[in-house]
Amino acid sequence: MKNYTITVNGNVYDVVVEEGAGNGAAAAPVKKAAPAAAPKAAPAAAPKAASAGAGSIKVEAGAAGKVVRIEANVGTAVKKGDAVVIIESMKMEIPVVAPEDGTVASIDCAAGDAIEAGALLATLN
């Protein structure tokens, strides 16, 4: 076990890190050194299990961010390079484009969703 003092946004935390069997992360806060406001959790994207993977061509996010708007609807024919979804990352709007020609089979996100890099946003046939 190792003890660390970590400062996040001006709040100081004492933490103990336990070396595990390679499971990824075993950090447990021991005590707060300074009072802090409760951290705001990012909104979780609603699962879209019914439509996920409807097409064989995946349209994935290139960066983490927030979905600003959906440019193509299910059934819309798109050409390679056409914008399917627009995401905002680092105060920039980034179009996520169709990797090849096809028809939109599913939209697996909604405007306002917080997404990670590599997240499935849509599929094409």
Image: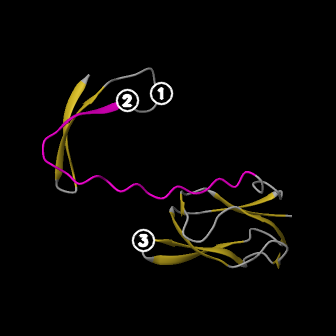
Q: Residue furthest left?
A: 34
Q: Would residue 33 appear left or right of 30 to someone viewing this image?
A: left
Residue of label 1 = 23
Could you say which is closer to the camera, residue 101 or residue 51?
51
Q: Quadrant of residue 5?
A: top left
Vertical comparison of 19 with 109: above or below: above
**At which x and y percent is residue 106?**
78, 64
Q: Residues within 10 Å of mark 3 (few under 14, many from 20)?
A: few
CA distance for labels 3 and 2: 29 Å
Q: Amino acid at mark 3?
A: Met
Residue of label 3 = 90
Using the image, tell me which numbered label, if any, was put on residue 26. 2
Residue at the spot 65% in from the left edge and 53% down from the top edge: 47
CA distance for labels 2 and 1: 8 Å
User: Quick check: marks 3 and 2 in contact, CB under 8 Å?
Assistant: no
The local secondary structure at tag 1 comes to loop
**At which x and y percent is residue 12?**
16, 46
Q: Is residue 41 magenta?
A: yes
* Image quarter of the N terminus: top left
Residue at the spot 43% in from the left edge and 76% down from the top edge: 91
Residue at the spot 54% in from the left edge and 69% down from the top edge: 112
User: Quick check: marks 3 and 1 in contact, CB under 8 Å?
Assistant: no
**At which x and y percent is residue 87?**
56, 72
Number of numbered callouts drawn: 3
Boundaries of the magenta span: 27-49
The local secondary structure at tag 2 comes to loop
Could you say which is closer to the camera, residue 34 or residue 17?
34
Q: Amino acid at mark 2?
A: Ala
**At which x and y percent is residue 64?**
51, 61
